[in-house]
Amino acid sequence: MESISNRSGDLSPNLNRYLMRSVDMDLARGEKVNFIYSKLGRFVIVGFIREDRLSRWQGSKVHVKNGRIEPCRYTLPREFFEYLNSRARRETELFSEISPRQLEKIDRSFRANADKFVGSDAYVAMQNDLRMFGDAAFAPDYTLEENGPKDSKKSS
């Protein structure tokens, strides 16, 4: 998957990781659209309950009898991209609530398996986020030190 270009200054700093790696679901409701959203890694399923302007979704329909899923050009409403960005932001907020103890366990597991990380989808997604957002791609409340995570909230 190619990374997204940062044309808007308001993108979530974990957007590439969210789009490539996350699992998420939601029942979304707006004034003119209602849909069920399921995300499994790179694969997104949107089931419309109500959508008054289906013409804004080009190339995204999978036909039941002869449908194929393959890379192609998709045209989606800008609001849907904003929705995806908001879901990525929500994931960042949830990550910031992980306890220092749990972060320590995650860090130990990561360090024990670091050789498997290089070249993985997670690695590529992290590289894309780092290229686009720099240090903002990391959780703001915690810093990793040589001996594991340090809760910067407690050290201030």
Image (cartoon, helix red, strand yellow):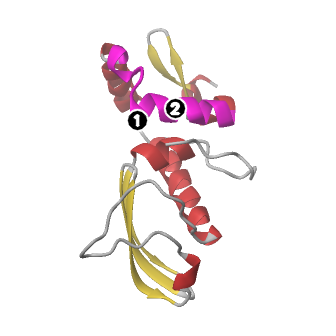
Rendering coords of residue 68 (x, y %): 32, 63
- The residue positioned 46% from the left and 83% from the top of the image is 34
Q: The C terminus is located in which quarter?
A: top right
Residue 126 sits inside the magenta stretch: yes
Residue 62: tell me if it is visible.
Answer: yes
What whole-number distance in Å separates the C-alpha atoms at marks 1 and 2?
22 Å
- The residue positioned 42% from the left and 33% from the top of the image is 122
Mark toward the viewer: 1 or 2: 2
Q: Residues within 10 Å of mark 1 (few under 14, many from 20)?
A: few
Which structural element holds mark 1?
Answer: loop
User: Overall secondary structure of the magenta stretch?
Assistant: helix
Q: Are marks 1 and 2 in contact (CB under 8 Å)?
A: no
Residue on which disc 1 sits: 99
Image position of 115 (left or right of 3): left
* Residue 153, quarter of picture: top right
User: Of the residues shown, which amino acid type is indicated by label 2?
Assistant: Met
Residue on which disc 2 sits: 126
Rendering coords of residue 28 (x, y %): 45, 75
Comparing 53 with 18, the one in front is 53
Residue 128 sits inside the magenta stretch: yes
Which numbered tag is attached to residue 3? none
* Residue 115, quarter of picture: top left
Image position of 18 (left or right of 133): left
Give the residues in magenta. 114-133
Q: Residue furthest left?
A: 65
Comparing 10 with 78, the one in front is 78
Which structural element holds mark 2?
Answer: helix
User: Of the residues shown, which amino acid type is indicated by label 1?
Assistant: Ser
- The residue positioned 24% from the left and 76% from the top of the image is 65
